[in-house]
């Protein structure tokens, strides 16, 4: 797998077509970094190939080789962990993260039956996928009108102070005197 010709053939054969359509396999480079935890080095080895997209952006293929006869139930979790570590090293001075295509080579003696994606490890796989892959929920206090914040009794006080915390004299804002007293008591 460390020979360029073998690596190209492997990637050409096993990468998803949609990913292969984006990248240029004519120039692949083997990265020296490994993300496999020390306690797993006897069972697993990894190879990271860096490639360029056809737009000359960086992309990676993360290949994890399991060389034991038993499948690892948690391997999809570990793959995510290793991919996040790989992405983390690209966060400095970058606007976008590179693409990563994970591949697992299994050579065990029994049928491979471990979960094939992170979501199948959760008690509610579809809900986990939805929660963790869609946009995160944003509570944008700056765009929320004060009147809407004031409708909430206890939460409204917290939201109001968070929204106006950077203002010099936030208690002189447009608040009724009775609410001002409640807010001031809450601060004490």
Image (cartoon, rainbow, N blue to C red):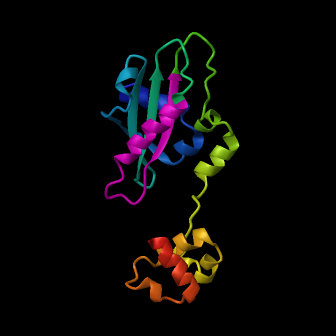
Range covered by the magenta-colored residues: 76-105
Quadrant containing the N terminus in the rendered view: top left
* Quadrant housing residue 138: bottom right
The picture places residue 22, in percent across and down from the top left corner, at 51, 48
| Residue 36 in sight | yes
Q: Is residue 181 above or below residue 41?
A: below
Query: Is 68 on the left or on the right of 88, as rendered?
Result: right
Quadrant containing the C terminus in the rendered view: bottom left
> Was residue 61 drawn as part of the magenta stretch in this picture?
no
Q: How many marks?
A: 0
| Residue 51 in sight | no
In front of the other: 151 or 188: 188
Residue for point 52% across, 70% down: 158
Residue for point 52% across, 82% down: 181
In front of the other: 76 or 103: 76
Residue for point 36% across, 53% down: 91
């Amino acid at each position: 797998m460390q020979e360029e010709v073998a690596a190209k053939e492997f990637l050409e054969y096993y990468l998803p077509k949609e990913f292969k359509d984006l990248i240029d396999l004519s120039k692949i480079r083997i990265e020296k970094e490994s993300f496999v935890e020390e306690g797993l080095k006897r069972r697993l080895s990894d190879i990271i190939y860096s490639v360029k997209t056809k737009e000359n952006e960086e992309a990676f293929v993360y290949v994890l080789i399991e060389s034991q006869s038993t499948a690892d139930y948690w391997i999809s979790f570990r793959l995510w962990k290793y991919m996040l570590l790989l992405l983390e090293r690209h966060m400095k001075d970058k606007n976008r993260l590179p693409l990563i295509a994970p591949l697992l080579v299994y050579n065990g003696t029994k049928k491979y039956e471990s979960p094939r994606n992170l979501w199948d490890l959760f008690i509610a796989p579809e809900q986990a996928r939805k929660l963790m892959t869609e946009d995160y929920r944003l509570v944008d206090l700056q765009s929320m009108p004060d009147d809407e914040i004031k409708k909430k009794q206890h939460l409204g006080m917290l939201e109001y102070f968070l929204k106006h915390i950077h203002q010099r004299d936030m208690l002189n804002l447009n608040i009724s005197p009775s609410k001002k007293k409640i807010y001031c008591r809450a601060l004490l």
